[in-house]
Every structure is written in C-alpha cells, then in structure tokens.
Amino acid sequence: MLNRLILLSTTLALGCSLMAGVLPVQAQGLAGTLQKGLNAAAPDELKQGETDPATIAGNLISAVLGLLGAVLLAYLLYGGYKYMTARGESEEVKKAIGIIKDAIIGLVIIVLAYAISSYVIAALAGATSKPGQ
C-alpha cells in the first residue's frame, strides 16, 4: 500500500511539474507559434511544396514506422514493468519475458522495414528523376 502511495505521489508530482511549462502559453499567439514550429520541424521537401509521389510515400512510411516504433517501445516498457512486478513467480516471469521478446522482435522488424523502405524509395526516386537533376 505504501509503495502504491509513493508511486502515485511521484507520478502526480512529475505530471504537475511537466504541466507547469505548458500552462503559461497564451491561446492568442498559439496559431503563429504552431506554424513556426511545424515549419521548423518539417523536412525540406515539404517546405518547398514537394509533390513527388516517392517523397510523399517515403514521408508517410517514415511516419507510420515511427509511430509503430513508439508503440513497440511502450510495449517493451510494459514487459519490463511486468517483469519487475512478477515477484519471482515463475509463470509471471515467463509471461514478462515473452512480452519483452515479442517487443524486441517487433522493433527489429520495424527497423528492417524502415531500412528496406528507405532503400526502395531512394531507388524509385532516383529512377524516376529527370536526367541532370
């Protein structure tokens, strides 16, 4: 019970401290601030209004694989949490190790998919570009 109370209070304190940096933002300048941030974060191809299908597909694939990587990282953290809270029970430890193995296999697949898709998109972009560009 005491451990849960400490965990809850630590989580609450951390959440409040993170929110303290968000609260001073004023709504009236938010649109301009967001636009500046999006322009700074966007790849150069999007800033120039690039409409090349290979570039659009590459950006879409990168975004989807990045999202999947984040989900699998959360799954890996969940497996680690289950392992830490198994308290030595062999059945719970086996489940946690299975979750961790699945997450690592998923992350390897995502990294390989990203590498393969980057190569294919670069090859397609090179094959479809005009000579001299």
Image: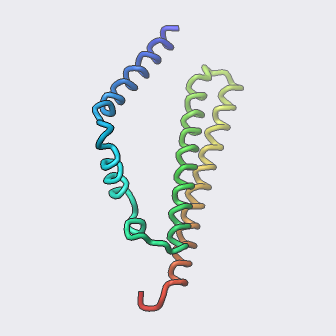
On the image, the x and y values in percent for residue 20 come to 31, 28
Above-or-below relation of 28 to 55: above
For the point 50% across and 74% down, the residue is 52
Above-or-below relation of 115 to 31: below
* Viewer-proximal residue among 107 and 43: 43
* Viewer-proximal residue among 26 and 119: 26
Q: Please tell me in which quadrant of the rendered image residue 73 appears.
A: top right
* Viewer-proximal residue among 68 and 96: 68
For the point 60% across and 61% down, the residue is 113
Return the residue found at the far right.
91
Q: For the C terminus, which image quadrant?
A: bottom left
For the point 50% across and 81% down, the residue is 126
On the image, the x and y values in percent for residue 110 come to 59, 55
Q: Is residue 68 left or right of residue 7?
A: right
Q: Please tell me in which quadrant of the rendered image residue 102 appears.
A: top right
Q: In this view, does 18 lie to the left or right of 52?
A: left
On the image, the x and y values in percent for residue 96 come to 64, 32
For the point 55% across and 57% down, the residue is 111
Total numbered labels: 0
Above-or-below relation of 5 to 42: above
On the image, the x and y values in percent for residue 72 come to 58, 44
Return the residue found at the far top.
1
Color style of the picture: rainbow
Return the residue found at the far bottom.
131
Q: In this view, does 7 lie to the left or right of 93?
A: left
